[in-house]
Amino acid sequence: MTFSQRANVGLRKVPSWLVYLVGGAIPFWSLYLAATGGMGVEPINALERELGELAILTLVIVLAVTPFRRLTGISLVMHRRALGLLSFFYVLCHLLVWLVLDVQDLGRVWADILKRPYITIGMAAFILLLPVAATSNNWSIRKLGPVRWRRLHQLTYVISVLGVAHYVMVQKVWEAKPLAYLVIILVLLATRIELPRRLSPAEKG
Amino acid sequence: GASLLGVAGRAHAQEELEPNSLEEITSYNNFYEFGTSKTDPKKYADQLTTEPWSIEVDGLVDNPGRFSMEDILSQFDIEERIYRMRCVEAWSMVIPWNGFELADLLSVAGVQDEAKFVAFQTLMRPEEMPGQQYPILEWPYVEGLRMDEAMHPLTIMATGIYGEPMPNQNGAPIRLVVPWKYGFKGIKSIVRITALAEQPPTTWALAAPGVYGFYANVNPNVDHPNWSQATERRVGGGLFSKRRDTLMFNGYEDEVASLYEGMDLTATENI
């Protein structure tokens, strides 16, 4: 067996529930740290950033599944749904921390959504995530049919660009880490572009 | 004599002047010379050598020259000033600074009549300040004040906190503190002070004109494009700390509002 075959056998042995359990526990662990002084003297901002970064990191892994398989033969595809739903969960936690702990005022939350471009963009990404997360199940694939379902889930591309734009824009300066995420996401999206295939001499006839 | 001004302010602001702990003051800092994260300065600022240190005083002054830290500490009366510190990012602290009035230093230097502004410059030493190796801002960090702001008795050169020498991450060994302005005006680790006839460039106004201005007075009525400045969060309140209202001129309105009479403080050129 080649290395990638062995890796695939190993990966398939990891049960989905374990991915959900470990991934789902991370925000609770962060919340515990933030509440007990493990995230520094200003834990609200630290927690908010941590959850946002976790969401974008998970989204990058989701986008990398296909190019990574093409490149290495190692497939994470059986865990892609779990990773996608976890990313949605992290975004939801990030949003709740912003709303409940940070801004603390629904009127101001609404004003910020309308007034601050980076928040408008982040909120647009969240709203687009809703139908994608809601249809991340076998029943929806059957109901929608694979073509429509796949088209709907290509919203992930738009969501990732909006999400990383939100991340870049929230900084006061052009910071290296968000810009690196932006480049990685653009490269991962570029691998989806189907270049027009040059006809071989035989095909030209 | 002027020390009372340090704790003055509006009556309702007085009771909030319970200082943050030294741990809080030294763990959550913006000092981009050591990295852009709030925790980077504490992690990396110990690389900075602060001895020997001197400040070059030049420009439109009668007595240009170098002030060593020893000269400064022996020449000026170091007193405690408990000030609110409001960051442009909408968080705040209360800090018990030790320092002396900038006006004292400027009068020793002998500021000439044509001098209308004062410019300040931070040390440029990329090998000890790793943030300066990246073009996130134009280095070295520069700041400025109008002469009347610089001469105001609330404006101090701080040399310590809680009676200890200034911690490196807070701008050792000597920094500016202007309590009615956003924290970024309080330029750290100063090596040069220049009296000028014209308004000097300032680092954040160069980085994002229209977002950060020369004046940078704390003003709850003028928002940052990315967030409201109407409220702030006091560092150290924990995960469930409530926001509090931001005060005009950070609570020092009675002392400094007269400096800006007739200026529209919401106009972009005056932010």
Image (cartoon, coloured by chain):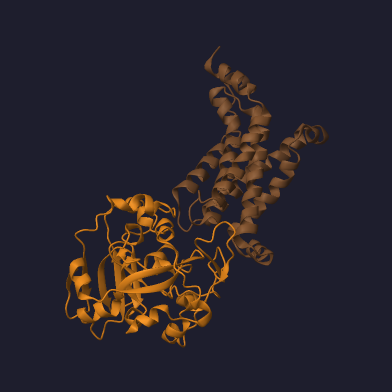
Chain colours: A brown, B orange
Which residue is at the front of the view, B170 or A113? B170
Q: Picture quarter containing residue A78?
A: top right
In this rendering, does residue B201 appear at all?
Answer: no
Kindly indicate the quadrant of the structure image that contains residue A6.
top right
How far from the left and from the top, in percent, is residue B60? 22, 79
Horizontal and vertical percent position of residue A106: 68, 64
Residue at 65% x, 35% y: name it. Answer: A21
**Location of residue B119 with respect to A18 vertically, above or below:** below
Q: Is residue A167 left or right of residue B170?
A: right
Tally of numbered tags: 0
Residue A184 rendering spot, x and y as whole percentages: 51, 40
Task: Report the quarter where the C terminus of chain A lies.
Answer: top right
In the image shown, does B249 or A205 lie closer to the viewer? B249
Residue at the extreme top: A1
Q: Is residue B163 left or right of residue B233?
A: left
Residue lying at 53% horizontally and 54% vertically, measured from the top left = A43
Q: Quadrant of the N terminus of chain A?
A: top right
Closer to us: B227 or A22: A22
Query: Could you tell me if residue A68 is visible in this image?
Result: yes
Answer left or right for B15 relative to B113: right
A116 vs B105, nearest the viewer: B105
In the shown orientation, is residue B159 left or right of residue B219?
left
Query: Could you tell me residue B141's position as x and y percent?
Result: 33, 62
Residue B213 in which image quadrant? bottom left
